[in-house]
Image: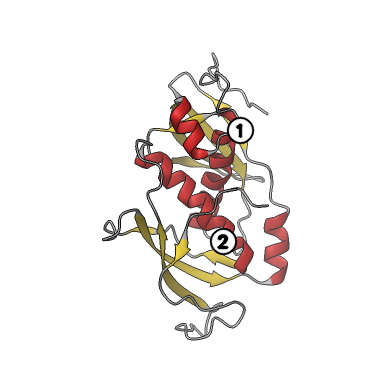
Amino acid sequence: MKRNAKSRGEAVSAVPSSPALAGATIDTEARPRASFVWQWPMVCPGVPSQHLEVEATADLMDHLEAMGWLLSRLPQRLSRPAGGGMAWLVHVEEAPLELRRALEARPETATIPTMRGSLVFARALLMEGVSIGHMEADIVADAAAKLRELGLIAIGRPVREGITHGLAPVMRVRIPVRQATPAEASALGHASADVDVVVPEASGEGVAA
């Protein structure tokens, strides 16, 4: 499922193609691995950089899913490129076919309103063969789509609150948010650009559909 309708990112270094990952440094004791630089241009002046990072994560995860790759760890933020925008060093590994199918059928990410001007995004985890970094980034990618739907802007970086262990482990990621201005919503292509939307609040922490 493509979560970023306006793809803007690009791999700016030579990226080995899947499945052979030709030219990559191959770890013969694990799945084929590779690294590349992912660059995302700053195309929305005035939009908080924290929100653009969330959008860029959704763009990257769509790209990896299409290529059949998994993150082996969270992307590492690099210095700002000379031409502007943002860049990350991304470490990936090839995803076996059965794991790709499992990811396509991944559980839905729940959205949990809070009293603290933020949303928590929670999802049951696929623990076998998928790094914690990949699962966290994938939850953030789902969050980007939900923020667009609600007309909200991230005003802080996503923070992993933790993992609830048990028969069905769940990861929770918190993102501080506020309502997008009409200019921000228009620039970002929010579906609700012309609708007043408020940050959901709850006396407890219930799950929103």
Residue furthest to the top in view is 203
> Residue 62 sits in which quadrant?
bottom right
Instruction: Point out residue 156 in the picture as x, y percentages from the top left corner.
Output: 37, 35
> Residue 81 sits in which quadrant?
bottom left
Instruction: Point out residue 163 in the picture as x, y percentages from the top left corner.
Output: 52, 43
Q: Secondary structure at mark 1?
A: loop
The residue mark sitting in front, 2 or 1, is 1
- The front one of 69 and 204 is 69
Q: Residue at x 64, y 26 (%)?
A: 208
> Residue 90 sits in which quadrant?
bottom left
Q: Which mark is residue 191?
A: 1
- Three-letter amino acid code of the residue under disc 1: Ala
Instruction: Point out residue 93 in the picture as x, y percentages from the top left corner.
Output: 53, 71
Left or right relative to 99: residue 177: left
> Where is 147 relative to 160, above or below?
above
The residue singled out by tag 2 in the image is: 63
Instruction: Point out residue 46 in the picture as x, y percentages from the top left corner.
Output: 35, 35
